[in-house]
């Protein structure tokens, strides 16, 4: 009798231990990932973490910060120091991105700031080279912000701004209004230039990049849809500023195209921010009064159709979203108050949109 009891007890304890170990593994690999190094996770687990955590910038302070990667420094050490200096929110997200993208962080000196996403920082560090200017231009920055970033790496800011108002001989620029700047065409990317590079060298490299990425087939697609490339870039710049998540870009593009086709004003907050932006605060927080109080042709709450120019420099994803929008009937959207990743709630009717608003903010 005692022997049978002891045997049952051993079976129970062994089973309980196995369940506990399995639970610990699931927690650490899927939910917690606490204390794990890259080698402790398979690619699926790392991808799951990347897909469920937003690569938001650490803040909105664009003050340049010099960051030095020492020879032999590990990815974990770099990620931890970036976090300690307030340049990234999540060192784990940074590390997983580095390994999943197959990046190799190069030793060297970098000029960074809080407004760069962890992915942009990782990508810039992949291409660190002695004797080179390495400039990362994130998607959705306006002309003046890019000039500021260029100035931080030694490019003459004033020359950059002056050249942005002068002519460059590219076929894709020909459908712009006569007084248009290069806003919208300064293609976001990481650029590597000789130390002695000028503002003209940088702008030429950015326009060449636009020319290569926005292909003749894409330009023909715009023409087939009855739009100029300039109109596509203008709308893409708004989509870029509105969409916090890349997968939502085609849906947001569909909303704006539906509104344009129905003769409804765009009602896009970023266009008001563009009108109000000034040095030190290029994307200010707007108020309800600004919807009618900012008398500017860029205020799409007051003026129908597209604004007179792009409001930022969109990436390839936003441009493709305008050319290939989702097929929806949505004409409204708003930030989802119950999500912390910047995603949106979409609606077909005003009643649905008001229901979403009420759910978030009450009556």
Image (tube, rainbow, N blue to C red):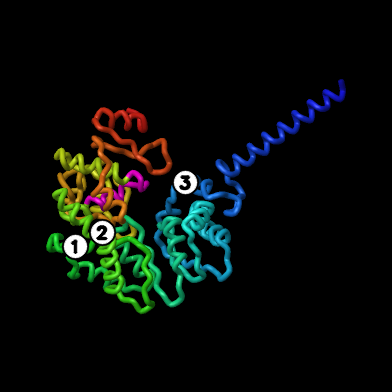
Q: Label for residue 53?
A: 3
Residue position marked by numbered label 1 in the rendering: 172
Mark nearest the camera among 2 and 3 is 2
Q: Quarter-wise, where is residue 314 in the image?
A: bottom left
Residue furthest out toward the left: 178
Q: Residue at x 24, y 59 (%)?
A: 215
Q: In the image shown, does 129 or 78 lie closer to the viewer?
A: 129
Q: Label for residue 214?
A: 2
Magenta portion: prevailing SS class: helix
Q: Is residue 265 visible?
A: yes
Please determine whether, in this image, residue 212 is positioned above or below residue 329: below
Image coordinates for residue 10, horizontal then vertical, percent: 79, 30
Decide: few, some or many residues near mark 1? Use Cα within 10 Å; few <14, some 14-19, many ≥20.
Answer: some
Q: In the image shown, does 306 or 316 lie closer to the viewer?
A: 316
Secondary element type, mark 2: loop
User: Mark 2 or mark 3, which has the lower sequence index?
Assistant: 3
Decide: few, some or many residues near mark 3? Use Cα within 10 Å; few <14, some 14-19, many ≥20.
Answer: few
Residue furthest out toward the top: 1
Image coordinates for residue 62, horizontal then vertical, percent: 39, 60
Q: In the image shown, does 156 or 214 lie closer to the viewer?
A: 214
Q: Which residues are magenta?
A: 235-248
């Amino acid at each position: 009798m005692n022997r049978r009891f002891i045997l049952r007890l051993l079976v129970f304890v062994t089973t309980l231990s196995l369940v506990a170990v399995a639970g610990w593994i699931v927690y650490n690999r899927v939910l917690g990932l606490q204390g794990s190094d890259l080698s402790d996770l398979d690619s699926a687990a790392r991808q799951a973490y990347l897909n469920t955590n937003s690569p938001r910038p650490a803040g909105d302070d664009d003050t340049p910060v010099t960051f030095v990667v020492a020879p032999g420094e590990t990815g974990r050490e770099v990620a931890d120091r970036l976090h300690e200096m307030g340049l990234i929110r999540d060192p784990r997200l940074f590390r997983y991105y580095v390994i999943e993208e197959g990046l190799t962080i190069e030793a060297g000196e970098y000029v960074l700031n809080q407004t760069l996403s962890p992915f942009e920082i990782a990508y810039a560090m992949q291409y660190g080279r002695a004797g080179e200017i390495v400039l990362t231009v994130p998607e959705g920055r306006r002309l003046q912000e890019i000039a500021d970033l260029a100035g931080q790496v030694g490019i003459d800011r004033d020359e950059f701004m002056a050249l942005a108002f002068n002519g460059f001989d590219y076929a894709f620029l020909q459908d712009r209004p006569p007084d248009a700047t290069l806003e919208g065409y300064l293609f976001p990317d990481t650029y590597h230039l000789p130390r002695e590079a000028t503002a003209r060298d940088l702008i030429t490299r950015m326009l060449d990049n636009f020319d290569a990425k926005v292909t003749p087939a894409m330009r023909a697609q715009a023409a087939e849809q009855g739009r100029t490339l300039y109109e596509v870039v203008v709308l893409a710049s708004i989509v870029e500023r509105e969409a916090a998540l890349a997968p939502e870009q085609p849906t947001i593009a569909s909303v704006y195209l539906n509104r344009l086709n129905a003769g409804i004003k765009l009602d896009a907050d970023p266009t008001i921010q563009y009108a109000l932006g000034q040095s030190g605060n290029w994307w200010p927080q707007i108020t309800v009064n600004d919807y009618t109080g900012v008398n500017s042709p860029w205020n799409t709450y007051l003026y129908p159709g597209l604004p007179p120019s792009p409001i930022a420099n969109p990436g390839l994803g936003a441009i493709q979203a305008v050319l290939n929008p989702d097929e929806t009937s949505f004409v409204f959207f708003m930030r989802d108050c119950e999500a912390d990743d910047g995603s949106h709630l979409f609606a077909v009717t005003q009643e649905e949109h008001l229901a979403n608003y009420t759910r978030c903010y009450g009556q």
